[in-house]
Amino acid sequence: MSGHNKWSTIKRKKGANDAKRSKMFSKIIKEITVAVKEGGADPDSNPRLRMAITNAKGVSMPKDNISRAISKGKDKDTANYSEVSYEGYAPHGIAVFVDCTTDNLQRTIANVRSIFNKYNGSLGKNGSLAFLFDRKAIFTINESDVNEDFELEAIDAGAEDYDVDEGMITVTTAFEDFGAMMSKLEELKVEPTSAEIQRIPKTTEKIGVDQARAVLKMIDMLEDDDDVVDVFHNMDIPEELVDEM
């Protein structure tokens, strides 16, 4: 398995086993709201909304919830959200990238800084760690939803990595090829369970199991914050901790 797909597979499994389903729902609802405000309520002409709806379906969000989120986005009185990222180091030198969507920047930075401080991490300047990560488009697809020619079709559309694990296909493309892959999936009438832009570490850092547990505690705290959309890091998670996920 490639490094890109290993990272994405771990992320998928962690999400699939996340007991806090309501937290996942609230973050996707926020993404739908932002997408509607940014590009309108028609998914056919709004790729970001189309992606958000795909991700909502991928976590079995009820249609009524999706419809309410779209209506909320159309409401002029709904709060305006800002998208912001924070970068820093967790304990043991692990680089961490935190993507947020918030209606209160002061609250968000205060919460993020507090978590970094609590776990002996340190926030850095924006852009200071960007060189450690590549932005990649990651698609997950049920293997049962595609035919035997799908891998070749995916490669033609720009797939850099293609991996199958436990009945799920993970396809990785360059950030710039996100639209081309989405168009190919629509052409093939294949609906992914998720389609995301992720920050993939160019290299990973190996640390001990106990040290990794401490880093994961900090990451879990960040992910639990309502304003945090995603957390990315460059830790090579020990296999025994991957199994626990």
Image (cartoon, rainbow, N blue to C red):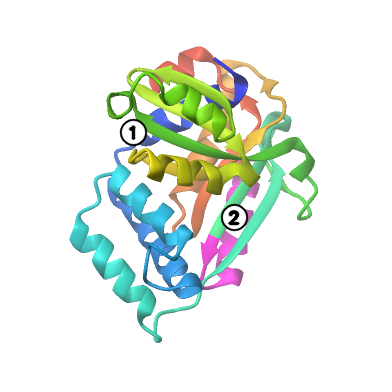
Compared across the picture, whether 118 is left or right of 131 comes to left
Residue in the image at 29% along x and 29% along y: 145
Circle 1 is placed at which residue position? 16
For this view, does 205 lie left or right of residue 104?
right
Assign the C terminus to one quadrant of the image: top left
Q: Nearer the viewer, residue 15 or 62?
A: 62
Can residue 112 be seen in the rendering of this structure?
yes
CA neighbours of label 2 inside 10 A, class few (<14), some (14 to 19), many (20+): many
Q: Residue at x 61, y 71 (%)?
A: 106
> Which residue is label 2 attached to?
112
Q: Quadrant of residue 129?
A: top right
Q: Is residue 8 visible?
A: no
Q: Please name the residue shown 65% across and 41% down the image.
A: 96
Q: Which residues are magenta?
A: 101-119
104 part of magenta stretch: yes
Residue 202, quarter of the rendered image:
top right
Judge whether 195 appears above or below 53 on screen: above
